[in-house]
Amino acid sequence: MIRLRSLVAPLAALALTGGAAGCTPTEGPDDRAAAPVYLGVETRLLQDDLVNFVVALERADGPEAVDDYARCAAAQYALIRGYGFARHVRTRLAQEGGIWKADAVYTISPALPRGALTIDAEVVVDQCRRDGIPTV
């Protein structure tokens, strides 16, 4: 009888937890609260092939997240205009009150532009969709 009593408490605890005592939830309330909030893209055409993107992101992991957001916007914009490529010119980053902002300038072109910071718009837009980053 003593052996049975020693098993009752652990079995009761297991039953009350639904057998999930050793399981870790994959997503909890804190995970949803920490997800980035994409606050929109402002697009300004500076010249025929030169475009300014101002993006804002709340709860970003850091400056890379808002830079990725601007790159995604530039890639989608290039596709919308019928171009396949973009080249990064410059990005200014700022953080204020928990909101990251990027003021980025890209050139867009139908052919691969010269320079090291070029992007294939279709490839980047596909990656943005997989990563859950919105585009224009």
Image (tube, rainbow, N blue to C red):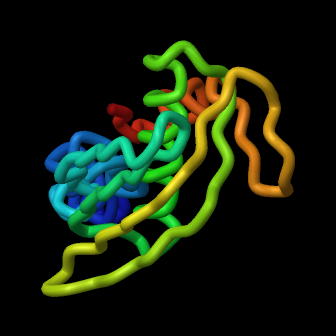
Quick check: 117 left or right of 11? Answer: right
Q: For this rendering, which residue is in front, 61 or 102? A: 102
Quick check: 127 left or right of 112? Answer: left
Quick check: can you spot residue 4? no
Q: Position of residue 79 (x, y in %)?
A: 52, 20
- The residue shown at (29%, 44%) is 43
Which quadrant of the figure has residue 86?
Answer: top right
Q: For this rendering, which residue is in front, 48 or 135? A: 48
- The residue shown at (30%, 70%) is 101
Which quadrant of the figure has residue 112?
Answer: top right
Q: Position of residue 125 (x, y in %)?
A: 55, 28
- The residue shown at (16%, 57%) is 29
Q: Position of residue 124 (x, y in %)?
A: 62, 34
Question: How many discs appear?
Answer: 0
Could you tell me which quadrant the N terminus lies in? Answer: bottom left
Q: Position of residue 126 (x, y in %)?
A: 58, 24
Could you tell me which quadrant the C terminus lies in? Answer: top left
Farthest top residue in view: 82
- The residue shown at (71%, 40%) is 119
Quick check: can you spot residue 128? yes
Q: In the figure, 6 relative to 18: above or below?
A: below
Q: In the figure, 64 relative to 52: above or below?
A: below
Farthest front residue in view: 47
Which quadrant of the figure has residue 85?
Answer: top right
Quick check: 2 left or right of 51? Answer: left
